[in-house]
Amino acid sequence: MLLENESNKVLKAILVGISLPGTSDIENKESLKELERLVQTLGFQVVGSTQQRRPNLSGAVPLGEGKLKEIAKITGGTGIVKSAVPVRKNKAKLRAEAEQGSAEDESEIGAQEAFADYKDEENNEQDEILEKAEAVVFDCELTPSQITHLQSAFGVEVLDRTGVIVEIFSRHAKTREARLQVEIAKLKYLSPRIREAGQSERQGSGAGARGSGETDVEIDKRRIRDRIAELRREIAAIQKEQGNRRAKRSEQPCVALVGYTNAGKSSLMRKLTGSEVLVADKLFATLDTTVRTLYPETQPRILISDTVGFIKKLPHDLVASFRSTLDEAMNASLLLFVVDSSDISWKSQLEVTQSVLKEIGVTDETPARLVLNKSDRLSKDDIQQLKSDFPDALLISTKNEKDIEFMHHFIQEFFEKDMLEADLFVPYNVQGVIGEIRSLFRVLVEKYENEGINYKIRGKRETIEKLKKLHNL
Ligand SMILES: Nc1nc2c(ncn2[C@@H]2O[C@H](COP(=O)(O)OP(=O)(O)OP(=O)(O)O)[C@@H](O)[C@H]2O)c(=O)[nH]1
Ligand SMILES: [Mg+2]
């Protein structure tokens, strides 16, 4: 899908942002900055960026003619959109062309057709682009045919935001389940593009090849469908196994760290659990949920789970495919929304996280707290402001040991407040319950009597009642 980078040479890319009505300049700039980080994560060097206001994303290309030519100059392309599908011309136009004897090449879309829907607006944003670019990346989702058209005009690879995100996911997926999920998303992304390629071949090869071209496309599509079905079956088997493990853990207190990519979830996870989960200053470092025990250990033990990060304009298929990965978050007793409070866009990033979680079925009923992370990057004034605006939030830096202790304490207290003390008598003939008692409750007293063991425990009321009922205690 992406440029093959055989010589390991760093490829240069320029970014294009399309500003649609209703979006602010700041939002669009932030979004482009984020795209820059995404593109860098893939190993490109960004040599410039440009934006254009458009009424919508439709048309053969979502750019004005002037902008198209301007970018083509940087990529060394012709700036002319070649069409895979011949352009329909109205009769008047054909007549006019016949009269002038200037019927243009059917495979080229002239400026009139390509930009028929709208007039080119002023080229309202032009940053310096000094170097020749080898790829053009759009900060929006393009249709497969728009990508084909743009590539013909620029003469270099054209990527869209969705394609970039899918590729990053594909490179970062580590566990078997994440790999399978990403493969489904990638196949779904590629599938319409295969159809387009088939169509253009068909167009080019005349009437005789039409039937076979069509069959090839059908075959490719069927293969993709079959492969997706196979992947789904494999995922279902893995999930069944995970479901069993999760059911075993379901009574244990669990906290899920959720939030935007790069907010510091894995860093917090590391510090809270003493584990070695991956922390990296790149987008989508974590793609799988990891569950570890809060350390120093509490009694009962508290589980912390680190989850995949979110991003704006996250492709829909990816959200759907990571639903199962986020099951941990759905089952948690406490959600910690981690944000990078030093990022000016943190509020909109939080909104994205909340809306994606809602989309996958995490209800508002799960207790949640806001964690304003990276406070070490804030000025004293910013800190004061945040404290007064968000008095309930936890303002921390994962780099500060005191803040980690504070988080540890906060989590412990959260579960402690729902706990009560209870007496429990376990006759010696009741098997397999001692381990459960030790993992689910804090054992205050354990006294061996003639008939069995007398416990004084501390734990959650519902969990105590459930255990009593299960074992007839
Ligand atoms: N200055 C500062 N940097 C931090 C802090 N917490 C995390 N970071 C840095 O932020 C970057 C991202 O951290 P991660 O913990 O990998 O972020 P994440 O939320 O797990 O990101 P994804 O896995 O992509 O969703 C890393 O470079 C961390 O070192 C903090 O409190 N202060
Ligand atoms: Mg992470």
Image (tube, rainbow, N blue to C red):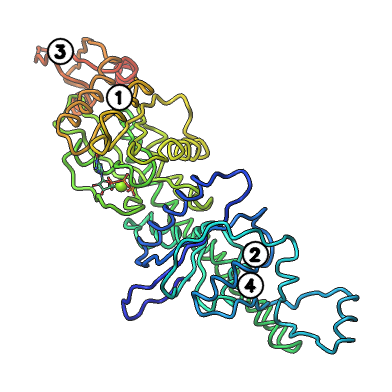
* Mark 1 Cα-neighbour bin, 10 Å: few <14, some 14–19, many ≥20: few
Q: Amino acid at mark 2?
A: Gly
Picture layout, residue 279 above or below residue 429: below
Residue named by callout 2: 64
- Name the N-terminal-most of marks 1 and 3: 1
Task: Check whether the beta carbons of the residues at disc 1 and disc 4 lie within 8 A of each other.
Answer: no
Between tags 1 and 3, which lies in front?
A: 1
Three-letter residue code for mark 4: Glu
Query: Would you say 74 lies left or right of 325 here?
Result: right
Measure the C-alpha gap from mark 1 to mark 3.
52 Å
Q: Where in the figure is residue 364, as x and y percent of width and height?
A: 47, 27
Q: Amino acid under label 1?
A: Gln
Circle 1 is placed at which residue position?
384
Q: Quadrant of the C terminus?
A: top left
Give me the disc on residue 277. none
Q: Which quadrant of the structure image shows residue 385?
A: top left
Of labels 1 and 2, earlier in sequence is: 2
Q: Is residue 17 above or below residue 155?
A: above
Q: Which quadrant of the structure image shows residue 402?
A: top left
**Closer-to-camera residue (192/264):** 264
Q: Which residue is mark 4?
A: 196
Q: Mark 3 belongs to which amino acid? A: Asn
Side of 161 where 192 appears, left or right: right
Q: Which structural element holds mark 1?
A: helix
In this orientation, which residue lies closer to the viewer: 211 or 207? 207
- Secondary structure at badge 2 equals loop
Mark 4–mark 3 distance (CA, rounded to whole Å): 72 Å
Depth check: give the residue in front, 279 or 136: 136
Q: Nearer the viewer, residue 324 or 296?
A: 296
